[in-house]
Image (spheres, rainbow, N blue to C red):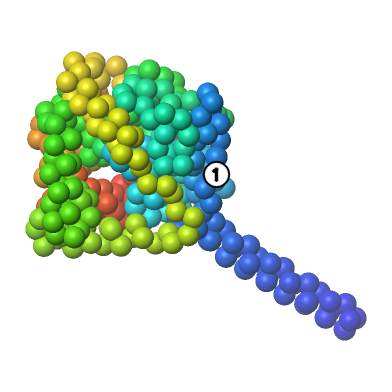
Amino acid sequence: MRHLLKTAMLGAALVATLTTVSARAADLADSWSTVPTQTITANGVDYAYRELGKSNGGTPVVLLVHLAAVLDNWDPRVVEGLAAKHHVVTFDNRGIGASSGAPANSVEQMADDATAFVQAMGFKQVDLLGFSLGGMVAQEMVLKQPQLVRKMILAGTGPAGGEGISTVGWVTFYDMFRGLLTGQDAKQFLFFTRTPNGIAAGKAFLERLKERTEHRDKEITVSAFLAQLRALRDWGTKPPADLSVITQPVLVVNGDDDRMVPTKPNTYDLARRLPNSQLIIYPDAGHGGAFQFHEDFVLKSLAFLQP
């Protein structure tokens, strides 16, 4: 009897240990700093991607990234926060970062590529989180393939033909020059206000982007960056689309002082023209308002994405 009891206790201890190890492994797998980069092929393009929270099931949340960005440009707190409740997938656009192929030079082509990636992953329907250029890609996706999208979160973005979008390139080059002169990352100027709160938030954001120290993504090439600027210029001069046909729920988010995609009128206009939208404007915040207020943004996004 004592032998059986001892064996049972050892078995229980082993199960507890394995459970602890599994839990730690799961925690590690759901860390943006360590999750592996994978590859999937669609239409002859090898797309680099990462995914978190796969075991959570439900509708996958696909993240569409901003101008000049690769996988490592996503805020870890946003990705991990969403992955706590959802299956989150991020990927490099064609010809960007570790993805193969020639970079797309139009938002429409980027939308087609994103759709090809989603279908290659085997997703029948997805939620989209598009930031900046990614928000424009999300709009094109839902207009072209409405059955593919359940809900959308559009942050720091605007509609086709929106005010100031065609000149994003000039703003970007100016702030890149300011960054070079001051020894700072250009995103400190592009994404955040020059107030004490904005400057502090920018520094904290840039530190979070450094959390992944191994197996980082490739940086965008100059030719790919120029192709994206051309896409933005053309999007900014494109005739406005009929957004009233988008019946999906949409959460529109921005800071109150976005220099890249001016909050007024773009963010307000976007929310007004989408018939089933909610609007969040963060105070004393710029283009990266969702990152500056990442805790609130994640909470509101999780509430919005509920079935």
Dividing the picture into quarters, in which one does residue 206 lie? bottom left
Confirm whether residue 60 shows in the render. Answer: no
Q: Residue at x 31, y 24 (%)?
A: 106
Q: Position of residue 98 (x, y in %)?
A: 46, 42
Q: From what the image shows, is residue 1 above or below residue 137?
A: below
- Looking at the rendered image, the quarter that the N terminus falls into is bottom right
* Label 1 SS: strand
Q: In front here: 48 or 198?
A: 48
Number of residue marks: 1
Categorize mark 1 by other alpha carbons within 10 Å: few (<14), some (14-19), many (20+).
few
Q: Residue at x 68, y 71 (%)?
A: 17
Q: In front here: 200 or 272?
A: 200
Confirm whether residue 63 shows in the render. Answer: yes
Dividing the picture into quarters, in which one does residue 301 lie? top left
Q: Amino acid at mark 1?
A: Gln
Can you identify the residue that label 1 sits on? Answer: 38
Q: Position of residue 282 (x, y in %)?
A: 17, 48
Q: From what the image shows, is residue 187 above or below residue 13?
A: above
Side of 143 relative to 44 (left or right): left
Q: Position of residue 137 (x, y in %)?
A: 33, 29
Q: Residue at x 31, y 39 (%)?
A: 222
Q: Position of residue 245 (x, y in %)?
A: 29, 17
Q: Residue at x 78, y 77 (%)?
A: 10
